[in-house]
Amino acid sequence: MAVNKQLSSHDAMELDKDCSIVLELSESDPLFDKKKKLLQDMGFSTKEEIHVKRSSDPNWISTSLKVMLQIERIINSDETELYFAGDEPMDMYGPRNELEALNSILQLVESSFSSACLMQKNVLQEFRDAIVDMMSQSGNKNILETKIVEGYNSDKERKLLQWGENNGVKTRLEIAYVEGAGRGAIATEDLKVGDTALEIPTSLIIVEELVQADMYHALEKFEGISSETMLLLWSMKERHNGDSQFKIYFDTLPEEFHTGLSFGIDAMTVLDGTLLLDEITAAKEHLRAQYDDLFPALCEDHPDIFPPELYTWEQFLWACELWYSNSMKIKFPDGKLRTCLIPIAGFLNHSLEPHVVHYGRVDSATNTLKFRLSRPCNAGQECCLSYGNFPSSHLITFYGFVPQGDNLYDVIPLDIDAAQDDFTEGSSISNWTTHMVRATWLSHNCNIFYYGLPSPFLDCLRRARSPMPHTKDLMPENLKNEIEILEDLRAICDDMMDNLGDADLDDRMESTYRAWVRQKRERLAPDNLDELCRELQTALGTAKWQLEEFEKAVRLSYGQRGDDHTTARHKQFIAAIENQISHVETALRESFSVEGKQPLRWVHLDEEECDDFAAFLSGTPQSLLCAKNEYVELGPSVKSSEENDFRRKDVDLKSNAACSRDISDEIKGVKDVTISKDPNFVMEVKGKEIAGMRDDIIYDADRTTNARKACSSPNYGDLRIIIADEVEHRKKLIPGCEDTPKEKGSKLVFWKQRCAQLHQATAAVNLFNQLFGRVGASQKQLQSPQKQWQTPLRLHNCCSVQATLGLMLTVFLLGVEAVSKVTRV
Ligand SMILES: C[S@@+](CC[C@H](N)C(=O)[O-])C[C@H]1O[C@@H](n2cnc3c(N)ncnc32)[C@H](O)[C@@H]1O
């Protein structure tokens, strides 16, 4: 574009005509109030008109784009993104959000072309190019490259592609085997933003209309049965139909899926006590209840339509896994949203940094479904979708994998029901009642007043301590308040960590240390103390080793790719844990020296022993190999009895089930913390009913509709946290001063909880630990072909995630350090 070109007066007049783009937050957005407030905080209204015209500013394009992106990121955000991103730089909304925001701007710019005059078109084109450029650059920061497995025989898949092309499919993708993800779709040529990677005619889409009349009539008698369930039952029979028009498609489907729904007894044992197991169990219970409602009744009443051998529980579960992991919700030109299976498109895997974000609407002009790129994909690269904004527990349960990279949706939900804040127009107070935490290294703001934690959560704690409005100035009263809320935080994590039971490594060191200090102080039975001391020594040794492994894992996982921020956060984290370890070590040494014992010694493991130890701790090959060998040696009779046990367990679970639910819905039970404003205030953590129960099998809507979901969070029990207002043990909270007293009479902080509830709390904390630390093991136990659990990453996840709450402790340490630095100044 010749910017300096001499403009004729006509041109100048044309150019002067306003070409503006309107960005508007829809009033029907379910998060309208929250988004409106955030927009207002940033100086925007809910309807902003951006004038796209050249100015004397040489950076006019990037300046305007930056503003538009700020607005669109908020408009395109979901609840989790809004919650965490309040005080964060824009890129903390995550790569998918950025792509969606840029995509929306691109669409607005493209739709302005039709009404623009020539000069304006040139300006718009320049603007469009800049957006596409940004889209091309977005993502790709932390995602590991996908590896294509060479020599994979994909005859069936090739046949399917051929069948598709003969029937009008247009594709620039081929099917290959991707390490860790099974089959995937690979670009055959360089694809740009806006290119269509795949186009499927609606005639090839498997939809409810395919259910034959006789089956439909037999099923419609079941009150409330959904068309999705009918279609699922249809697919159970159709996959065996040699004359099916979709035979070639059905032939490409796996004999077995490896989602959480079909985890075997080994995996379930590994997951024992975790919330992930609860989630999987509840989902299976629900499906079992659905199955029992329909069968054997249907087979008995209509054996010709529902032959019993095709409608066993195992086949039903297979079909559920197929529909949960492969279906998409598509809007058709008649305005109806249908859950479909889409041959060929079903090969597209999920990524946290997807290439295709919008694929939920049939193009009425061509009557095809188009998969257009929002990010370039070069020839040979795997082209990925976003299945939705899911936490890893959901992805494991319904899809059977954990995505590579940091999943911003892995959160621990806390529903803090403090004395209600008034959410008034223009007030700076947010109206969040549901709170959550996630790994703090995902935050860019670790400064005083933020500590890498979400502001709504911190603000809630602040208001509970003092109802006065809070500013973030370094005023003495603010700092005093900060120390107090950090103490509350510390207390919350401390107690949760204490209750971790046999939690992993560093957590174990922390809790053993606290128990040891307590025993020493109270001078209880010396035998117990000796035993605790030995335990502590072991835990300390393990934590030291673990930290080394963690450092190695971080280096290996990120290599050169880690951005400065991630590296800095990991360094901070490592330093803080080192600090804790060194503190415990010093305390032990001093105690040994006072008691005249041998000084501390550490066992040195050689490389092989280290590997064995790593395998043992992370439940990976060696230990599993043993388990597997034992299993094989026991022979088929044992196997079948185990299977029977499991089936029995399934039935028992069903009979004990308190409730069933619609598993495509969020599991809405969350921790519910009540904070009163009494001087000795009480936080009450209540279990919530699982919401969203419906009687049908509904598949995952999020795959295409872009309906936003927050986190899935299992049903928690009740917890009560009582916090005394008096804070006089500040020194005890400073790193390494003392353990946190929890006994009666303690003036500081203590929890009261019933046993069962304690278990729930432990489970809540272990969600992260065990989800990441152990699910990998269970997948291996299942001998899943998906080997995403490479040791460095596994350990990285395991160590880092297990310390998520430990990290809140770290946050506390960093916070105290920051506050004390400021007070010293
Ligand atoms: C719609 S299918 C995609 C095609 C599938 N890979 C296949 O071989 O048929 C969804 C399944 O692919 C796998 N998958 C998808 N995305 C993945 C990812 N990022 N990592 C690992 N597995 C993935 C999971 O097994 C999931 O249940």
Image: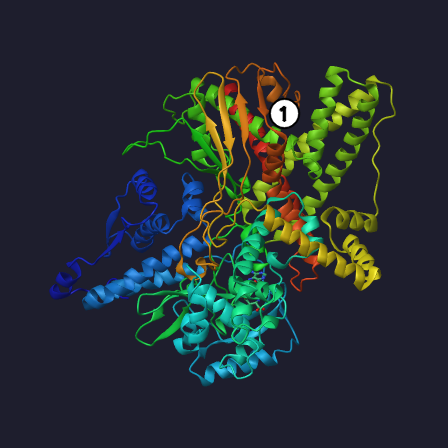
Looking at this view, is 425 or 95 the one in front?
425
Which x, y percent locates residue 607?
Answer: 81, 50
- Position of residue 135 relative to residue 436, above or below, is below
Residue type indicated by callout 1: Pro
Which colour scheme appears in the figure? rainbow
Residue sitting at x 46%, y 77%:
171
Residue sitting at x 80%, y 62%:
637
Quadrant of the rendered image containing residue 218: bottom left
Looking at this view, is 31 or 426 the one in front?
31
Residue sitting at x 69%, y 38%:
503
Looking at this view, is 217 or 807 the one in front?
217
Quadrant holding ligand 1?
A: bottom right
Query: If the image is split into quadrants, where does the N terminus sit?
Result: bottom left
Left or right position of 546 against 169: right
Residue 286 in view, yes or no: yes
| Number of numbered discs visible in the structure rendering | 1
Q: Which residue is mark 1?
A: 735
Which x, y percent locates residue 247?
Answer: 54, 80
Specify the farthest residue to the front. 301
Which x, y percent locates residue 9?
Answer: 11, 63
Which x, y percent locates residue 470?
Answer: 39, 25
Specify the farthest residue to the bottom. 166
Left or right position of 593 against 236: right
Quadrant of the rendered image containing residue 641: bottom right
Give the secondary structure at mark 1.
loop
Looking at this view, is 524 or 151 the one in front?
524
